Image (cartoon, helix red, strand yellow):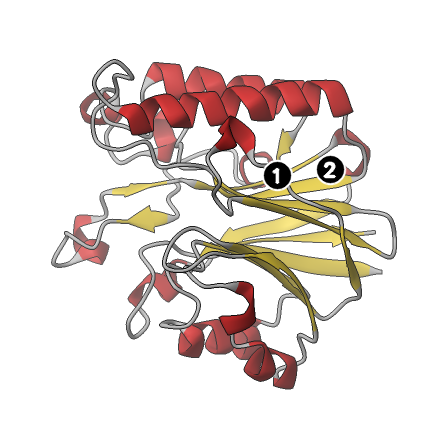
Amino acid sequence: MPFTLATWNINSVRLREPIVLRLLQEHGPDILCLQECKSPVDKIPTESFAAAGYSHMVARGQKGYNGVAILSKLPLEDAGDQDFANLGHARHVAARLENGVTIHNFYVPAGGDVPDRAVNEKFGQKLDYLTEMRDWFRESRPGKSILVGDLNIAPRADDVWDHKKMVKIVSHTPVEVDHLGAVQEAGDWVDITRRDIPEGLLYSWWSYRAKDWDAADKGRRLDHLWATPDIAGAAHSSRILRDARGWEKPSDHAPVFATFDL
């Protein structure tokens, strides 16, 4: 049974409930993974999501910060969470579908503004978080799994608007790219988005600071959708819904989609 999955950093699920509902109603993914929900789990507007057909949810939350949730039309069971780098943050949750596929939803730390852990604790936390992700996947060797989320790194030169200008900016520095690559290698993850869209500039985030984000188009591909090799061949139809960045009271991220024929 094929299903379509989307991942979206919503930047407050309660504040942006209307555009979450718009996405659900207009585009109808079977599963929607949200990051930066900024809400305790019991405050997530589950009634309106259930009314739209999404009666299943697995989530981890905290007041005002972080938070991850998986909304689904399909039955889900909670598959746990990990607190990498011992930050005490709600940054990961996993759920398992009835067909045995496990979905990992991540919100990797942004890392602050200075790419030097000696002067910026947040950057060190980001690198430590990625290192522990790597080690966990290296040990667990996941199968039949999908990994999605705001990983806060744009790894390729064509995942940012200007590689030369961005190479010293947090989210695109070589050390971050190397750490993310190690996570990907540890789980043999396939970058489904770039497998389906292998060439050209591709973004999922545009800063609020740009008065006209669409015309300036200084984007970064921070949001990712990966799969293990045993199911990667079943994935297709990847796309980024750029238009959602222009909706009323938008997130600064756009949803990323893929369909799996499983």
**Quarter occupied by residue 77:** bottom right
Q: Residue at x 54, y 35 (%)?
A: 194
Of all residues shown, which one is farthest toward the left? Answer: 211
Q: Amino acid at mark 1?
A: Ile
Q: Is residue 137 above or below residue 242?
A: above
Q: Residue at x 58, y 26 (%)?
A: 133
Q: Which residue is mark 1?
A: 192
Mark carried by residue 251:
none
Mark carried by residue 232:
2
Indicate the secondary structure of the residue bearing disc 2: helix
Label 1 and label 2: CA atoms lie apart by: 7 Å
Apparent side of residue 173 relative to residue 36 in the rendered image (left or right): left
The reply to whether residue 80 is in sight is: yes
Apparent side of residue 40 relative to residue 165 in the rendered image (left or right): right
Callout 1: 10 Å neighbours few (<14), some, many (20+)?
Answer: many
Apparent side of residue 233 relative to residue 112 in the rendered image (left or right): right
Q: Nearer the viewer, residue 244 or 137?
A: 137
How far from the left and from the top, in percent, is residue 95? 72, 51
- Cβ–Cβ under 8 Å for marks 1 and 2: yes
How far from the left and from the top, in percent, is residue 56? 71, 69
How far from the left and from the top, in percent, is residue 260? 74, 51
